[in-house]
Image (tube, rainbow, N blue to C red):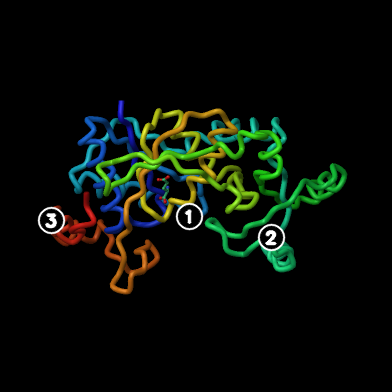
Amino acid sequence: MFRTRFAPSPTGYLHLGHALSALTVAHCAKVADGEMLLRIENTDFTRCRDDYEQSIHEDLKWLGLDWPEPVRRQSDHFPDYKAALQRLIDAGLVYKCFLSRKDLMAIIEENPAMSAEGPDGPVYFGKPLAATEEERLIEQGVPFAWRLSISEAKAALGTKWKEITCRERSFTDRYAIKTVPITPEIFGDAVIARKDIGTSYHLASVHDDALQNVTHVIRGDDLKEAVHLHRLLQVLLDLPEPIYQHHRLLTDETGKKLSKRDQSPALKDMRENGVSLDDVKQRLGSLLP
Ligand code: GLU
């Protein structure tokens, strides 16, 4: 069965850009006679809030959407993500990184192969410290993140590395599916378990897409590059491969993507001010499928 999901992070009130995404995902599910799940991606407890989460449910109902219950809330499932991380640890594919942001920037500045600007932040390639050095830092209470080692992943996959692809479904070409090569190294050794939360969006999302039998991951173009890392994680964790589909983003008059931080209108305010679903659809216009 065609199953997709809308997976917001409750780090702010949803805005028109989210309405575009949710309506697009729901539309694709409907025309395929499938279903859309709602998943709350709230592992980042430093930014997520319960009132934002509550509002997500109300906003989506206001948009006329429906989804099966119970809704998966990632914060209820940290042990699942820990177990997925443990598999990567056991396979020797990740290493502890104790660098502060300042240390990281200094290293990157001196290394032409690295860069401060990757899809997800700094592009850094490193390796584990000697065991005694790790022990010393841990004893001192220095926090660490887990990074996925591109060189170890390449070594583990051998010739399979070059064969990893992703299937991308198009909005414009009658939902045609293209198979495209992936290049996870654009992320460098990505942080897949953050120092503070013990997981990352990438690991939790990939884990849940597999667990929930998501066949089609449909989301905004801003997450298009994440596919490279997500496909690699799927291969390394032996998870099924969904089809990916990325929709255009809503931009402001200057062409900049709308974000929660900008003054883009919150759906909550719109519904409280009597804006109708038709008004929303009209504002989204031709961006809607
Ligand atoms: N939780 C992510 C966000 O709000 C979306 C994740 C996804 O669709 O893969 O940006």
- Within 10 Å of disc 3 (Cα), the crowding (few <14, some 14-19, many 20+) is few
**Does the numbered disc 2 mark a residue whose Cβ is under 8 Å from ligand 1?**
no
Rendered view: 104 above or below 239: below
- Residue 106 spot, x, y in % from top left: 73, 67
Rendered view: 241 above or below 282: above
Marks 1 and 3 close (CB-CB < 8 Å): no
Which mark is nearer the camera, 2 or 3?
2
Q: Residue at x 33, y 36 (%)?
A: 4
Under circle 3, the secondary element is loop
Looking at the image, which is closer to me, 53 or 265? 265
Q: Which mark is residue 113?
A: 2
Marks 2 and 3 close (CB-CB < 8 Å): no
> Which comes before the other along the chain, label 1 or label 3?
1
Spatial distance from mark 1 to mark 3, Cα to Cα?
30 Å
Q: Which quadrant does the N terminus fall into?
A: top left
Q: Residue at x 43, y 51 (%)?
A: 224
- Residue 197 spot, x, y in % from top left: 58, 46
Under circle 1, the secondary element is loop
Q: Which mark is residue 276?
A: 3
- Within 10 Å of disc 2 (Cα), the crowding (few <14, some 14-19, many 20+) is few
Q: Is residue 19 left or right of residue 164?
A: left
- Amino acid type indicated by mark 1: Arg
- Amino acid type indicated by mark 3: Ser
**Residue that label 1 marks:** 47
Q: Is residue 173 left or right of residue 44?
A: left
Looking at the image, which is closer to me, 247 or 167? 167
Q: Residue furthest right?
A: 132
Looking at the image, which is closer to me, 233 or 274? 233
Rendered view: 279 above or below 237: below
